Image (tube, grey):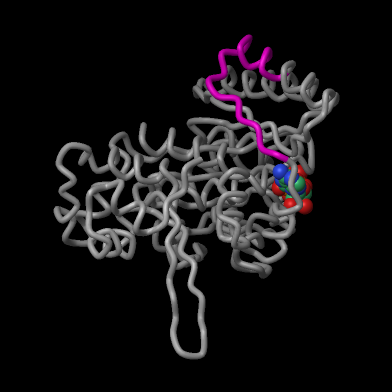
Amino acid sequence: MEIYKLAEAASRLHLSANSLKSLLANRTIPSIIRTTKTTKSTHTSYYIPEAFIAYAEKALKLKERFDFTRLESEQDYTEAFANKNGTQVISFSNLKGGVGKTSISANFAYTLALLNKRVLLVDMDSQANSSRYFANRYFSGESIKDIFDAIIHKKKVDAEFINRYIKKIDFGNATLDLLPSELSLGRVVEFSRAVFTMPHKKLNDILKPIKANYDFIIIDTPPTTGLSLHMSIFASDKVSIVTDAEDFSVNGLNELATEIQEIEDETEHVVAVDSFFINKVKKSNIHQVYIEAIAALAIEQKIEHVYTVSDSVRFKEAQNLHIPLLEYKNEQEKKFVLSESLIDYAIEKAAGA
Ligand SMILES: Nc1ncnc2c1ncn2[C@@H]1O[C@H](COP(=O)(O)OP(=O)(O)OP(=O)(O)O)[C@@H](O)[C@H]1O
Ligand SMILES: [Mg+2]
């Protein structure tokens, strides 16, 4: 992947370095920003992969004109990047634990935010790992569980109420909203089964009043079948299945696909599984065999995208430091390569939306 620094990107775009700098500063063109401080001064470096430049051009439809100055107000800017066909809700799922649902959904949400999309990350797993991924704290008494509690107790749950539970995460070069989870979410969700005739619709009901504020809502789901998963799938337009390249996982994919089909049939709500993320891939023959088996399944089930993500300790390290993979460590080339599938999928969704 070609990665440009400021001067190279400016020449690529036929802009002066200063003009490009202001486009990077106001995030018209996304980038990874690195500041190094010495005792005397602060130096800012910008790293821009080709894909981000191409995306900004496409999103702003300025390929011929390069009239970047058109964006004057905050509103122009939001409108230029807003989804033309409204909010897209995407769940990352698998019935198997530990395959990377949380890592992929959190980093995917960040990548969309980097592409100037308005993004809400919803944690539907009571382990609350994606809540802690960026926020690095627990959310007892201030999570989506409390919203479920409120609807169970027939309280008024409008946008104002829901917004009280949404946390803003500011990365400097992007912002992301988070609707966190907590340990008792599973219990409260299961309790709602006894209270409502159509409990699987309740997450969708919660998202409805705030949906228009976002271009994308990304849902991280638990590794088990149950009402949390069904609610997540019912609320989604697309499901992305995260898996690893192991024997059990390949079999499990069929099971999940069948379950999604059943939910569709039961609820008459169309949810497309549009991608597989094969995560933690190592350079081994056996992994290659499983990747091919998953790719064959994807063709059979008419799943559009199959992405692979390499196994790297950087995922764990970035998560432990509560930062996106793209913001972790200095070697730009390495982290852009590791994130390539996530960037491809984010650009595919963001540019087509
Ligand atoms: N590509 C990768 N290479 C190496 N480690 C990874 C990779 N992706 C994720 N991990 C690590 O694997 C562990 C499990 O990942 P993660 O929590 O994202 O999985 P999960 O599917 O959400 O798990 P759960 O089912 O418990 O919700 C974490 O420690 C994470 O940092
Ligand atoms: Mg998880």
In this rendering, the answer to whether 55 lies above or below 137 is above
In this rendering, the answer to whether 10 lies above or below 165 is above
Residue 75 colored in magenta in the image: no
Residue drawn at x 21%, y 57% as measured from the top left: 75
Give the left or right position of residue 56, taking residue 51 as reference: left
Give the left or right position of residue 20, taking residue 295 as reference: left
| Occupied quadrant, residue 292 | top right
User: Which residue is outermost to the top?
Assistant: 300
Residue 302 colored in magenta in the image: yes
| Occupied quadrant, residue 339 | top right
Quadrant of the drawing holding the C terminus: top left
| Occupied quadrant, residue 55 | top left
The image position of residue 136, as x and y in percent, is: 66, 68
Residue drawn at x 57%, y 31% as measured from the top left: 239
Q: Nearer the viewer, residue 187 or 229?
A: 229
The image position of residue 222, as x and y in percent, is: 71, 43
Chain part drawn in magenta:
294-310
Q: Nearer the viewer, residue 279 or 300?
A: 279
